[in-house]
């Protein structure tokens, strides 16, 4: 699926289900923004919940605001997966001179781990990360370009003191990332 098609489908999904993605993303952002320690512990399970809500919305399934907390049913796996991704990314970043660049590339490699865990709860955290690495092989640049295509939206969000991010940009990005994942998932 082309980037333009992914973004068009994401916009359509956001228009169809306007305010609940904003609420889900808003609560997620407030909880994660509390402190870095809380963020580290809760980001994995909350990300699973965000993915659950957005995927149900894209598939026109019954969804509820409480889907945001569905990642807490099996708290340990999303927690460990999120922490491992952070640790791996940090360790790659410690390599002198080229570390930050390698860390960014590796972050793209690991970026589907929690989505994979959402779809395959039987996976261990390490298996979800390994599967993400395989799926992103040959797609990291595509994901980078997708992220880069939002740069003007990010700038507008910054200029509106993140109000636009809260109301539109972040839900739009979430839908786009999930559509990207669904597209490459079909290849594997």
Image (tube, rainbow, N blue to C red):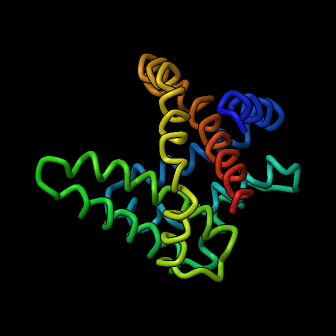
Q: Is residue 19 above or below residue 35?
A: above
**Residue 83, how many percent across, how many down?**
38, 69
Q: Nearer the viewer, residue 9 or 105?
A: 105
In the displayed structure image, the side of residue 140 where residue 39 appears, left or right: left
Q: Nearer the viewer, residue 12 or 158?
A: 12
In the displayed structure image, the side of residue 188 where residue 80 appears, left or right: left
Name the residue: 49% across, 56% down: 111
Name the residue: 71% across, 49% down: 183
Name the residue: 47% across, 24% down: 151
In the displayed structure image, the side of residue 27 where residue 186 appears, left or right: right
Say which quarter of the image contains residue 69: bottom right
Q: Is residue 117 above or below residue 163?
A: below
Most extreme residue toward the left is 96
Q: Is residue 68 above or below residue 172?
A: below
**Residue 6, how many percent across, how many down?**
70, 35
- Which quarter of the figure is the C terminus placed in? bottom right
**Residue 86, how many percent across, how many down?**
35, 63
Say which quarter of the image contains residue 146: top right
In the displayed structure image, the side of residue 142 where residue 175 appears, left or right: right
């Amino acid at each position: 699926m082309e980037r333009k098609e992914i973004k068009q489908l994401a916009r359509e999904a956001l228009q169809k289900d306007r305010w609940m993605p904003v609420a889900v993303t808003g609560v997620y952002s407030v909880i994660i923004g509390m402190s870095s320690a809380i963020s580290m512990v809760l980001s994995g399970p909350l990300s699973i919940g965000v993915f659950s809500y957005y995927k149900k919305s894209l598939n026109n399934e019954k969804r509820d605001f409480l889907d945001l907390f569905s990642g807490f049913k099996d708290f340990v796996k999303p927690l460990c997966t999120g922490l491992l991704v952070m640790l791996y990314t940090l360790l790659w970043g410690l390599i002198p001179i080229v570390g930050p660049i390698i860390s960014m590339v590796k972050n793209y490699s690991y970026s589907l781990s929690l989505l994979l865990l959402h779809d395959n709860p039987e996976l261990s955290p390490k298996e979800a990360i390994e599967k993400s690495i395989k799926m992103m092989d040959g797609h990291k640049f595509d994901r980078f370009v997708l992220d880069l295509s939002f740069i003007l939206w990010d700038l507008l969000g910054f200029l509106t003191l993140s109000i636009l991010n809260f109301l539109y940009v972040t839900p739009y990005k979430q839908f786009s990332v999930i559509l990207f994942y669904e597209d490459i998932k079909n290849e594997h």
